[in-house]
Image (spheres, grey):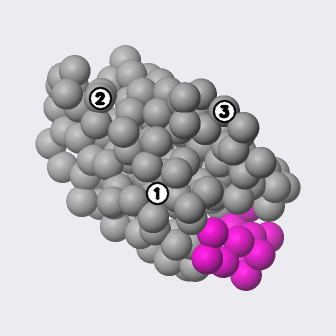
Amino acid sequence: MKQLLVITHAPTPATVALRDAVLAGASDPEFFADEVDVHAVAALEATDPQLYLDADGYLFGTPVNFGYISGALKHSFDSTYDDLLEEVARRPFSYWVHGRSDATGARRALDAITTGLDLRLVAEPYERLGELSDVDLAEAREFGATVAANLIA
């Protein structure tokens, strides 16, 4: 069974809704019951490199704060980055971001961090700005399923 490590910081109702939709898609028992184990960890608790090393792929989620990723997710990367270099190369990943008006800086930061780790992007990052609709949440669920499917493809 493949393990998908989902690391998120979800301090707002919108980020909680996105996180829950992504997790629902990634762990849909109709598609992934015996193939993907989804391990969700809050970003502030994801400071042990072994969490990353035990996983086959990654899904990151963050609000956009002041044009950047959350400090909690940044802390996870800061705490593990050196130990992960070369150890997680080419593992599949993607990410979602939610902001109010612009997510460019957050996407740039995540792209730089994941490029440094040499992770392999398997689904176009999911970005939403402002209020979320039911369509946004349905798309987030599909996004989560797409990332999980890439672990077993």
Q: Which residue is drawn at 60% across and 57% down?
A: 151
Q: What stretch is highlighted in magenta?
A: 79-91
Identify the amino acid type marked 2: Ala
Q: Residues within 10 Å of mark 1 (few under 14, many from 20)?
A: many
* Mark 1 in CB contact with mark 2 (< 8 angstroms): no
Query: Is 6 drawn above or below residue 110 in the view shown?
Result: above
Ranked by sequence position, the earlier of labels 1 and 3 is 3
Q: Mark 3 points at which residue?
A: 33
Query: Which of the two residues, 101 or 141, is positioned nearer the viewer here?
Result: 141
| Badge 1 element | strand
> In the structure shown, which secondary structural element does the residue marked by tag 3 occupy?
loop
Q: Gap in Å between the C-alphas at discs 1 and 2?
A: 17 Å
63 versus 68 height, above or below: above
Q: What residue type is labelled 1?
A: Ser
Tell me the CA gap for discs 1 and 3.
21 Å
Q: Is residue 42 visible?
A: no
Say which residue appears at 30% left-offset and 27% top-offset: 137
Q: What number is the disc on residue 138?
A: 2
- Tell me, yes or no, whether the two marked residues, 2 and 3, touch with CB atoms within 8 Å: no
Location of residue 33 (image quadrant): top right
**Marks 1 and 2, the one that precedes in the sequence:** 1
